[in-house]
Amino acid sequence: MDWIMFAIAASLAVFGTMMVYSASAMIAHNESAGATQFTYFYKQLAFTIAGIFLMFGASRVDYRRYNNPYAVVAVLAVTVGALIAVYGFPEINGARRWIRFGSFSLQPSEMAKIALPLFLAYYLTRNSDRVGDLRATVLPCLACLGLLGGLVFFEPDLGTTIVLCAIFAAVYFAAGAKFLHIVTVVGGLVLIGAAALLLAPWRLRRLGAFIDPCDPDNAAGAGYQVCQSLYAIGSGGIFGEGFAKGQQKLFYLPYPHSDFIFSVVGEELGLFGTLGLVIAFGLLLWRGARAAIKAPDRFGTLLGIGLITGIIVQALFNISVVISILPAKGIPL
């Protein structure tokens, strides 16, 4: 087991839990009519502890046990079933992305970030001599991406769909795909993304607000979230306002404890805090890519590349939205 990577991942989880407390304390206090400020913190703490134990347990399992058709089909079946099941639950903020069990909720699109690289690693390992064959490998792999990505896209969740496409491109490129195939697939995905923007009025509004989120016409509408995010990061300066001393999270910045928690880090811990967080993700990428490259077999290499790509692309996507490099899209850090 790579203890350095384990320590980095665990540290990020613990740091995130502390920032969730800072970002959500006033929200929890308001929702509970003053009864408690720890609602979101306790929930995140429970997930963090469970996640660290699960991460340790998973590291003791030989990943090669999943390099068989039964495991791959089982994971795909459960994931597809969960992605379909979300349509049986009420919408939350205009989307059906969660399966709810009381106060607990499960987001099946997170499962897709594991199921897709698992299938790709298995299939491209079994067909290593036909990676460039359109019928033998390209179309079956695209079919898996289309199934998982399509179900996620229509929730709707364009951000996670883009992450899945990035996983596909990274794994297929690492498997030795022809450059022409990669360009063709990426070009097709870009066209689909453009169509998704043009056919959804709210996405067009977000794209328009992205150009100047703090313009008076946008600051109170489609650009409000990003504008408040930029205020938060800008007010933090180099050293920040201090832990739990930020102001934008006090009902100005939407979703400060989830989608825009990086803004809270910027306001309270400043440039040093945000830069440290980016460096931590960079170290995680380094250790993850290193582990994938040093894997003893092709399956391990492709699976590792797919998993680390999903983590890093999602983080980059979130940070890019928060600092207005990309149009607003709800995807957590």
Image: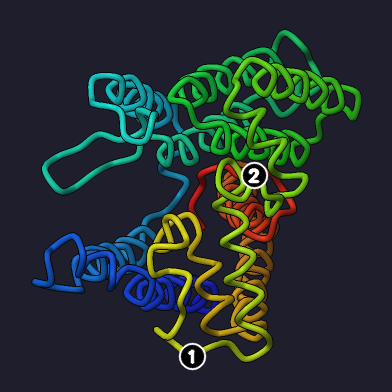
- Residue at 8% in and 71% down: 35
Q: Nearer the viewer, residue 1 or 75?
A: 75
For residue 238, which quarter of the picture? Answer: bottom right
- Please tell me whether mark 2 sits on a helix, a strand or a loop: helix
Return the x and y of residue 215 as percentages of the image width and height.
71, 50
Return the x and y of residue 273 as percentages of the image width and height.
59, 82
Depicted 246 relative to depicted 148: above or below:
below
- Residue at 77% in and 19% down: 191
The residue where tag 1 is placed is: 242
Circle 2: residue type: Asn
- Residue at 62% in and 47% down: 223
Q: Nearer the viewer, residue 7 or 59?
A: 7
Depicted 315 relative to depicted 111: above or below:
below
Residue sticking out furthest to the front: 216
Return the x and y of residue 277 as percentages of the image width and height.
59, 75
Depicted 21 relative to depicted 175: above or below:
below
- Residue at 58% in and 87% down: 240
The residue where tag 2 is placed is: 218
Inter-mark Cα distance, 1 to 2: 30 Å
Sequence order check, earlier mark of 1 and 2: 2
**Cβ–Cβ under 8 Å for marks 1 and 2:** no
Return the x and y of residue 133 as percentages of the image width and height.
79, 15
